[in-house]
Image (tube, grey):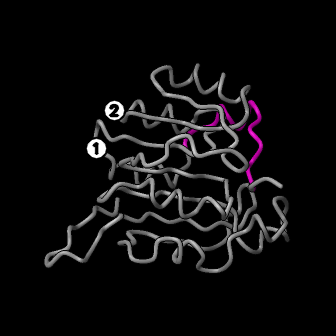
Amino acid sequence: MSGALLTPTHAHAASAASPWLQRWAHLLPPGARVLDVACGGGRHLAYLSERGCVVTGVDRDGTALALAAERAPSASLTQADIEHGPWPWPGRQFDAVVITNYLWRPLIPTLRASVALGGVLIWETFAHGNETVGKPSRPDFLLAPGELLRVAEGWRVIAFEDGFVPEPARFVQRIVAVNQAAEPSAPPRYPLT
């Protein structure tokens, strides 16, 4: 069994970065070390690399990674089955972890541990209700109501959405959260652009 993943097609891989990622990319300064999990054809790697981030991508699909290498030549790419094999970066942390259209719950502790203190988690994937409009439709691959809020428990949640997107029709949850050890006396202000 594999995590829910929007299978990369050439049309999908050639598409622009997710509007959710584009909206929150300003939280990642130039030079930020970013991991794109299940990066597919590299649309997010290319976008973040153009913004000056140091990008790393992982995917099990070698064909998708070849396209990612073309789109983001400076990206560090790893072909790995992160669901059934070892995590490629044990103990390594990133300034941001980006995940779109992918869910494999056993990886959640590893993904959280991969976000450095002060780092950002940007996650957008399918949610309960998607079974009424298409695939994925299995509950294993659909976030329960508020599930990403529980994933980010103890962190500073900057933005969260849980709802329906009409084009293409899908139910999604999205979160942007900062790994903060404790609430500072004067919390930083994150621009909501």
Label 1 element class? loop
Going 60% across and 27% down the picture, which residue do you hit? 68
Label 2 element class? loop
Q: Which residues are magenta?
A: 4-17
Query: Foreground: 190 or 59?
Result: 59
Look at label 2 and name its amino acid. Answer: Gly
Callout 1–callout 2 Cβ contact below 8 Å: yes
Going 74% across and 25% down the picture, which residue do you hit? 63
Q: Which mark is residue 29?
A: 1
Q: Classify the position of the C terminus by image quarter.
A: bottom left
Residue 136 x/y as whole percent: 81, 60
Going 56% across and 52% down the picture, which residue do you hit? 99
Residue 156 x/y as whole percent: 35, 72
| Callout 1 crowding tier (Cα within 10 Å): few <14, some 14–19, many ≥20 | few
The residue that mark 2 highlights is: 52
Q: Classify the position of the N terminus by image quarter.
A: bottom right
